[in-house]
Image (cartoon, grey):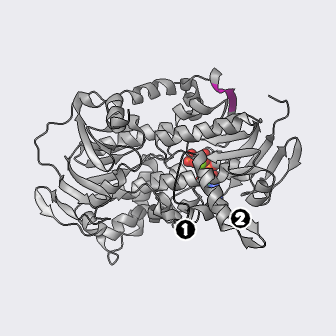
């Protein structure tokens, strides 16, 4: 390791109205290393990246690139200096093609004209590095969000950069995709590129990192060699509690209680629900007070199942019963009327309204269900918002702050609050803890379980098999757009789920 860091910050500070997002932060990144930033939601990780790359201006402090003081006024300037960044919120153009997204802003030209042939070939090559073969001429939004994420990664790694910054690139990827990404990162690292990585996944942190910088409340808590930092110590430093290790161990222990007695009337029963080319006929039951987990790889049909049940897509076969009565759901609005709520995986596209306040975002679904002619009183709105801000530990100045200014994990919590506020009978959670820090993750799932105890039924989708196994009473395993098994009681183990998911491929 050379003595001069490739990138360094000294006393970097940045305040937003009401928060000191960065407080005199010293940070160093060396060539040929993977350096991971860890910290709770709102700790300042993305802000550090944004200030480093010219998205925000620092108020105080210095940034040095290879020993030279620099200041970027725009992300383009940072790019020109060899810093490639994949920001936390995917910033691609959904209606451009995959290839156009990979080469946006730097299309190769031939005699003044955009050289499409070269663009398509090089885009395919960039994706092949990640073991992906997509039709690069298709528009990006024809692919699911995880695939779009891979396209963003392909864009970032396909450039000759000296520094690669990745802010939570893996939050919607499955294990296979993470493995492929890490293989690429290791190759880049071996060629001397410096990689700055942000994640909330502890296992990933240890799998890829040489060094870890922990942030807490805008300050740099410390910098460590990954090999010298036990996981309990890391968590304790992130949350600032010396007993956090014990809490983590307790929260990670699988639940041993038996599933609630079967045989009761399911809240929701689906028989043979299917849609051609999307999902093969599938049966499901969700009991009040229970969590049914859906496990499977990306593309196995998890989200598709949720959307069919919620009426967001139309099933072309099968029947749905709610409380024993046949129902036809032809739109999400019908589903909401029947007491369902759906917290979608793509918070940007289907979820948050960036300019509205936290309060307005939280009451949105409740208001829509009551009808817009019966406005919820301002005082009641405020009360609801304050209640969920406290319950879910949403880090914000107050309920009137626009949600777009919150950190990613805190936006996710607001979205969850929106659906909890409708007091649904069946809640569909699609990757609800995406981007949420380790400490908050367990708290949120505890809250969800407490609601369950009051009779709420939950359909729970997560790419993290360990999370599905930990929280679910029963687990439906999907493979290639069909349900291949349902596990309950003692059968619910990570090992079992992995075997079923892998199927014949193992
Ligand atoms: N543009 C902005 N305007 C106002 N406040 C902001 C802005 N950007 C960030 N903040 C605030 O700064 C603090 C740090 O946010 P940041 O996004 O850096 O957190 P983070 O560590 O990346 O969290 P997460 O893990 O949730 O992504 C938060 O309190 C956030 O609300
Ligand atoms: Mg962030």
Describe residue 262's horizontal placement relative to residue 227 as left or right. Answer: left
Residue 257 in view? no
365 or 187, nearer to the observer: 187
Q: Secondary structure at mark 1?
A: loop
Please tell me in which quadrant of the rendered image residue 205 appears.
top right
Q: Residue at x 33, y 78 (%)?
A: 373
CB within 8 Å, label 1 to label 2 = no
| Magenta part, dominant SS | strand
x and y percentages locating residue 323 in the rendered image = 13, 55
The residue singled out by tag 1 in the image is: 355
Q: Which residues are magenta?
A: 222-226
N-term-proximal mark, 1 vs 2 = 2
x and y percentages locating residue 118 in the rendered image = 68, 62
x and y percentages locating residue 413 in the rendered image = 46, 51
Q: Quadrant of the N terminus?
A: top right
Q: Residue at x 34, y 64 (%)?
A: 366
Which dot marks residue 286? none
Which of discs 1 and 2 lies nearer the camera? The answer is 2
The residue singled out by tag 2 in the image is: 107
Q: Is residue 230 above or below residue 435?
A: above
Q: Which residue extends farthest bottom?
A: 373
x and y percentages locating residue 410 in the rendered image = 51, 51
Q: How many marks?
A: 2
Describe residue 172's horizontal placement relative to residue 66 as left or right. Answer: left
Q: Secondary structure at mark 2?
A: loop
Q: Residue at x 45, y 40 (%)?
A: 441
* Residue 457 counted in the magenta span: no
Q: Quadrant of the C terminus?
A: top left
């Amino acid at each position: 390791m050379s003595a001069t860091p490739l990138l360094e910050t000294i006393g970097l500070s940045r305040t937003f109205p009401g928060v000191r997002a960065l407080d005199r932060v010293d940070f160093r990144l060396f060539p040929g290393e993977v350096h991971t930033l860890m910290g709770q939601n709102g700790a300042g990780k993305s802000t550090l990246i944004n200030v480093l790359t010219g998205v925000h201006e620092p108020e105080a402090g210095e940034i040095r690139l290879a020993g030279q003081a620099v200041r970027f006024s725009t992300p383009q300037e940072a790019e020109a200096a060899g810093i490639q960044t994949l920001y936390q919120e995917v910033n691609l153009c959904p209606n451009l093609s995959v290839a156009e997204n990979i080469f946006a802003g730097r299309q190769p030209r031939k005699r003044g004209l955009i050289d499409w042939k070269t663009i398509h070939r090089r885009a395919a090559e960039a994706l092949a590095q990640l073991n992906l073969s997509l039709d690069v001429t298709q528009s990006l939004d024809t692919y699911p969000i995880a695939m779009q994420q891979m396209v963003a990664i392909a864009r970032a790694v396909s450039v000759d950069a000296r520094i690669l910054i990745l802010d939570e690139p893996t939050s919607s990827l499955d294990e296979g995709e993470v493995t492929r990404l890490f293989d690429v990162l290791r190759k880049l690292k071996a060629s001397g590129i410096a990689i700055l990585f942000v994640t909330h996944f502890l296992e990933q942190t240890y799998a890829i990192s040489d060094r870890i910088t922990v942030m807490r409340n805008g300050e740099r808590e410390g910098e460590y060699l990954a090999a010298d930092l036990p996981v309990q110590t890391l968590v304790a430093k992130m949350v600032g509690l010396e007993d956090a290790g014990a809490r983590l161990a307790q929260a990670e222990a699988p639940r041993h209680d038996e599933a609630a007695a079967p045989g009761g009337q399911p809240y929701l029963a689906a028989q043979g629900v299917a849609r051609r080319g999307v999902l093969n006929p599938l049966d499901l039951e969700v009991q009040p007070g229970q969590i049914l987990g859906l496990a499977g790889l990306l593309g196995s049909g998890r989200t598709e199942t949720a959307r069919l049940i919620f009426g967001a897509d139309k099933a072309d076969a099968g029947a749905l019963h709610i409380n024993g009565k046949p129902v036809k759901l032809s739109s999400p609005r019908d589903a909401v009327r029947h007491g369902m709520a759906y917290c979608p995986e793509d918070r940007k596209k289907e979820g948050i309204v960036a300019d509205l306040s936290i309060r307005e975002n939280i009451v949105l679904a409740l208001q829509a269900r009551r009808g817009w002619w019966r406005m919820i009183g301002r005082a009641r709105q405020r009360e609801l918002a304050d209640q969920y801000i406290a319950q879910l530990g949403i880090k914000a100045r107050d309920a009137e702050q626009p949600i777009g200014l919150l950190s990613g994990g805190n936006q996710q919590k607001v979205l969850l609050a929106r659906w909890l506020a409708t007091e649904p009978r069946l809640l569909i959670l699609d990757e609800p803890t995406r981007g949420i820090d380790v400490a908050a993750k367990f708290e949120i799932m505890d809250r969800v379980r407490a609601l369950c105890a009051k009779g709420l039924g939950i359909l729970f989708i997560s790419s993290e098999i360990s999370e599905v196994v930990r929280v679910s009473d029963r687990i439906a395993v999907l493979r290639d757009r069909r349900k291949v098994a349902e596990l309950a009681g003692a059968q619910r183990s990570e090992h079992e789920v992995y075997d079923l998911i892998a199927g014949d491929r193992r």
